[in-house]
Image (tube, helix red, strand yellow):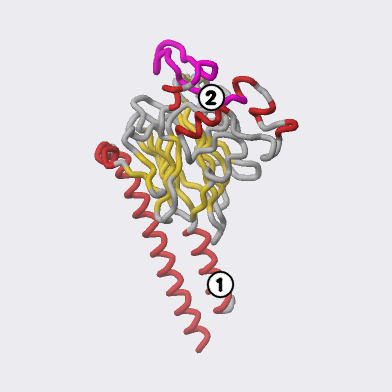
């Protein structure tokens, strides 16, 4: 029979391992349907979904295990058949609804994160290094941490030489994405490659400066770490595509009373349900630990 000390150790280990799992609440505040995609980093298992449809005003909750590393983005202008085959105007991932290990075709706005294990912190950012297709905000909850994102519509001010023009239909034939200078010209000085593959020689360019002025907290080029990487230990991350134009990142948080009033019941229900579920899990395991410790103490005295 296991010793009381071992039982207590197992219970505590189980509690901490489970309670640090993370949830992503993905919300589509765009006035059109998007198709978010996810890509796991090397050696990291995929999320329960790697691609899905999300209609305007809808939210979905995606759980992640401790230590998960990867990225998330939104595809636009997609058409898929019954088998999940098709294509997207921006952010395509191999012509499939489920990306299944395929990344976003640039340009695409990216949310990137590496979740900590145990007491380790999470590292996260929003990147437009590979270009931009949609406004994006990322806000940790229950961690007292900084929000980040690129909430300005860069497509509206995208230089002509970086513009991606959409086909007629869907969101129309206007500018649907804005390439990075690397994607548009392929030069080492813009791609931070070759002799420019270090932070000393690869400096911000005229084009990355346009991105940075629009979105000061987002990665604008490969070595833009100082103002663009954030750390936290949160149980929930809100990922919002097309946050309301009135939204601002102030003192590290997202402030948008207009958007809060307009958020759909689906979004509110998912968020509150997720929060209640996490709280119930924490309490359940606390009760479990208490009973195990009491049992162990009684066993020890007998």
- Asked whether residue 96 appears in the rendered view, the answer is no
Q: Nearer the viewer, residue 229 or 115?
A: 229
Q: Which of 124/275 is in front?
A: 124
**Is 46 drawn above or below residue 281 in the view shown?**
above
Q: Which residue is mark 2?
A: 92
For the point 56% across and 36% down, the residue is: 39
Q: Position of residue 53 (x, y in %)?
A: 42, 29
- Visible in this render: residue 63? yes
Q: Which residues are magenta?
A: 159-182
Residue 152: give x, y in percent of width and height: 41, 31
Q: What residue lies at 71% left-to-right and 35% top-to-bottom? A: 197
Sequence-wise, the earlier of marks 2 and 1 is 1
Q: Are marks 2 and 1 in contact (CB under 8 Å)?
A: no
Across and down, in percent, residue 3 comes to: 58, 78
Q: Is residue 178 magenta?
A: yes
Q: Secondary structure at mark 1?
A: helix
**Residue position marked by numbered label 1 in the rendering:** 9
């Amino acid at each position: 029979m296991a010793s009381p000390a071992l039982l207590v150790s197992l219970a505590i280990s189980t509690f901490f391992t489970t309670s640090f799992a993370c949830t992503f609440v993905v919300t589509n505040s765009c006035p059109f349907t998007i198709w978010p995609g996810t890509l796991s980093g090397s050696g990291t298992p995929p999320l329960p979904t790697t691609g899905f449809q999300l209609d305007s005003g809808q939210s979905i909750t995606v759980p992640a295990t401790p230590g998960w590393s990867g990225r998330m983005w939104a595809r636009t202008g997609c058409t898929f058949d019954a088998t999940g085959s098709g294509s997207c105007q921006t952010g395509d991932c191999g012509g499939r609804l489920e990306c299944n290990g395929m990344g976003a075709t640039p340009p695409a706005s990216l949310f990137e994160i590496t979740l900590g294990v145990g007491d380790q912190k999470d590292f996260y950012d929003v990147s437009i290094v590979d270009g931009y297709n949609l406004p994006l905000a990322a806000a940790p909850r229950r961690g007292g941490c900084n929000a980040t994102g690129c909430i300005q519509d860069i497509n509206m001010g995208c230089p002509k030489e970086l513009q991606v023009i959409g086909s007629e239909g869907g969101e129309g034939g206007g500018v649907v994405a804005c390439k990075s200078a690397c994607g548009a010209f392929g030069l080492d000085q813009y791609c931070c490659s070759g002799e420019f593959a270090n932070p000393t020689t690869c400096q911000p360019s005229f084009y990355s400066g346009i991105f940075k002025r629009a979105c000061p907290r987002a990665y604008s080029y490969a070595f833009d770490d100082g103002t663009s990487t954030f750390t936290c230990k949160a149980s929930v991350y809100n990922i919002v595509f097309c946050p309301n134009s009135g939204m601002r990142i102030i003192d590290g948080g997202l402030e948008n009373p207009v958007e809060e009033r307009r958020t759909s019941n689906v979004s509110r229900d998912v968020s509150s349900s997720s929060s209640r579920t996490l709280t119930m899990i924490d309490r359940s395991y606390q009760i479990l630990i208490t009973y195990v410790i009491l049992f162990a103490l009684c066993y020890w005295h007998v």
